[in-house]
Amino acid sequence: MRKILQMIRPLRRVGLLIVLSATISSLLLPGAVLAAPLSGRQGPGNCRWIHNIQYGQTLESIANYYGVGVYALMQANRIDNPNWIYAGQRLCIPAGMMPGPGDNNGYPPPRPMPGGFYTVQPGDTLATIAWRYGVDVPFLMRLNGLTDPNCLEVGQVLRVSAGDGGGMPDQPGPPERPTPQPPVVQPPPIMNDWHAAYYNNNRLEGNPVFERNDGDINFDWGTGGPGGGLGDDNFSVRWTRDTYFAAGNYRFYATVDDGLRLYVDNKLIIDAWRVQPATNYFGDIHLDSGNHNVRVEYSEDAGGALIHLTWNRY
């Protein structure tokens, strides 16, 4: 019995070395992303093809190449973990699946199907569509402006022939002519200047001492005046302006020291014709689209003199 045990011990060591070598070899064979060329011939049983795994291939890359789902390959080859494959392993490609583009394994190349377009169906991959039409995946990607071969949607229409210059299929005839639109009428330019008449009294009476164009009604003369022959007190000004307004409600804002009257199309909007310190006012009016006349009348009695005017639509 002792002699038998002495004979078995070396055999056990050899077996352990074999198992350890196999384990180390499987760990040193990483699953890379890039696939090597696929090869095979008609396989036995339910296998359409037999594929010999090359170093660096993964189950996913092989499945994509043949247009097969990873799960279908795992079922056909009784693989529990998709990462547990190794170089030299023979895979069964299930019957009914197509080989990848550019490798017909001795079979005649596929005959292009009629029509220049194809509508993506459930289960389609770009590889299977390319094989069906006798082209390759990069060609279809360039032709359809695709950046990712895995991003397809059911119902998506792909161009599969560069020579077909027609439009997408199922289009309802020529496009309808657009309904002629009336020309866009541009509003007249907005006049930026006010015509101003300056009077040497606070009642706008007689002839103005001078007239000029003012860009804005935005003056703070303090205890002085406009000059030009007018005194620092007891003067008045009338500003008029024709301005284009879009239709809408408008609010006019004014700050004045002393008196103010504001008219729009001769309608009095603000009536503050009195001696007063700087005071804020506003008035509202609805205007139709078009040109409207705005008139501002101002009077200065004595002391400080200022007037500011603006408006907006609301």
Image: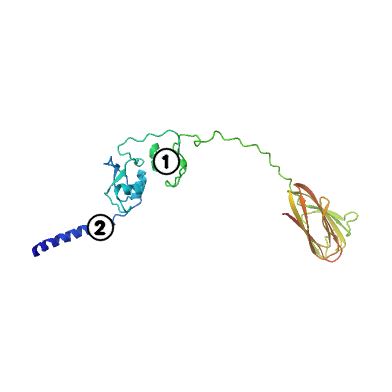
> Which of 189/313 is in front?
313
- Residue on which disc 1 sits: 139
First reached walking from the N terminus: tag 2 or tag 1: 2
> Which of 147/222 is in front?
147
Q: Amino acid at mark 1?
A: Phe
The answer to whether residue 53 of the structure is visible from this angle is no
The image quarter containing residue 107 is top left
> Which of 170/134 is in front?
170
The answer to whether residue 126 of the structure is visible from this angle is yes
Q: Secondary structure at mark 1?
A: helix
Q: Secondary structure at mark 2?
A: helix
Would you place residue 208 above or below residue 159 in this image?
below
Q: Amino acid at mark 2?
A: Thr
Outermost residue, right direction? 206
- Residue on which disc 2 sits: 23
In which quadrant of the rendered image does the C terminus lie?
A: bottom right
- The location of residue 94, given as percent across then percent down, is 32, 43
